[in-house]
Amino acid sequence: MIGLLVLLFSCKHDRLKIDVSKVDVNLNVYHTEKLIFVKDSSAFSKNLDYILTNQKGFFDIYTKHVLQIGTSDDPNFRYYLESFVKDTVISRVADSVNYVFNDFSKIEKQLIKGFKHYKYYFPNNQIPPIYTCVTGFNQSIFVSEYGVGIGLDKYLGSNCIFYNYLGIPHYKCANMHPGKMVPDLFYSLYFTDFSGNDSINDLLSNMIDQGKAIYFTKAMCPEIPDSVIMGYSTKQLKWCHKNEGRMWEYLIEKKLLYSTERLTLQKFIGDAPFTNVFSEESPGKTGVWLGWRIVASFMNKNENITLQELMNMNNAQVILNRSGYFPE
């Protein structure tokens, strides 16, 4: 009996595991790359006309800000777009995209499940249309008023030969795989819909803002492993759990929480192969992970606070104070 009580006491309720089976969402996914990467010139022209009639808002964002070839209103637009599509390297990239994502159904199911959670927590928010495309390795996820763009060429797999040609560091390539796409999308949505701070740009405010972003992403994707959500290997995640107390103690002892120095923020928040003040076994962005732990502690300690209310809380100090966060 005592053993059973200990077991029951030790089982913590995971408030992010919710039933969304009865939540209805209507998700529209448009595959832009399939329309413009065609061999026949007449088909290209016909498909482009269709895009400019039905998807012009998004397409102008894509071509101007991602491809940087201007908008469809520019006189030479069609020539520039066709030059991009027919480029030898880009054509090979498009072929790889078509091969890797020939069947998009699995990812679409993940997106639908994610947006069911989104609709559950934020019933008044609209579900944005999703546009897949080839970006010339310029962008992974980009969000606009017309919808969310996914650069499929940024998710071809960690061992993709193009990434090696481009000289992309290994620690970045490790997260350029299809499984990272859906978490990246919701992480980006956070910064479009909710991100904000209390006008204080110190390490703590950045940690909490990033921690909220990761917590939001996990809420949308509760079945995706924490390691994938953070972009860590399993070994790196274990290192963080093992050394959580030591990392937090370091920030306190060095009085870094309220530092506004750019290099300090970059050291703990920026993407990197490891956090150099700890060890080469540590991952980068350890400040982000600690921020996530603080936010999760806050939400577990304050079960009356909803996710929507958390998103509206912009005072990092209040969240820390009410989190009861104190790792051993």
Image (cartoon, helix red, strand yellow):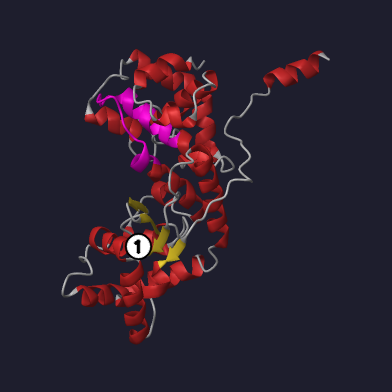
Is residue 138 in view?
Answer: yes
Closer to the camera in the image, 102 or 318: 318
Q: Determine which quarter of the picture holds residue 84.
A: bottom left
191 within the magenta span: yes
Is residue 136 in view?
Answer: no
What is the x, y in percent for residue 119? 51, 43
92 above or below 121?
below
At x 57%, y 39%, the residue is 222
What is the x, y in percent for residue 22? 63, 45
Q: Give the amino acid type for the residue marked by disc 1 in the picture.
A: Tyr
Q: How many marks?
A: 1
Closer to the camera in the image, 126 or 35: 126
| Residue that mark 1 sits on | 165
At x 50%, y 37%, the residue is 121
Instruction: Report the magenta residues as a range.
Output: 190-214
Near mark 1 (Cα within 10 A), the count class, few <14, some 14-19 or many ≥20, is few
- In the image, farthest residue toward the front: 124
78 within the magenta span: no
49 above or below 97?
below
At x 46%, y 17%, the residue is 323
Instruction: Label 1: state its secondary structure.
Output: helix
Q: Quadrant of the N terminus?
A: top right
- Which is the main secondary structure of the residues drawn in magenta? helix
Q: Determine which quarter of the picture holds residue 156.
A: bottom left
157 above or below 205?
below
What is the x, y in percent for residue 313? 38, 25
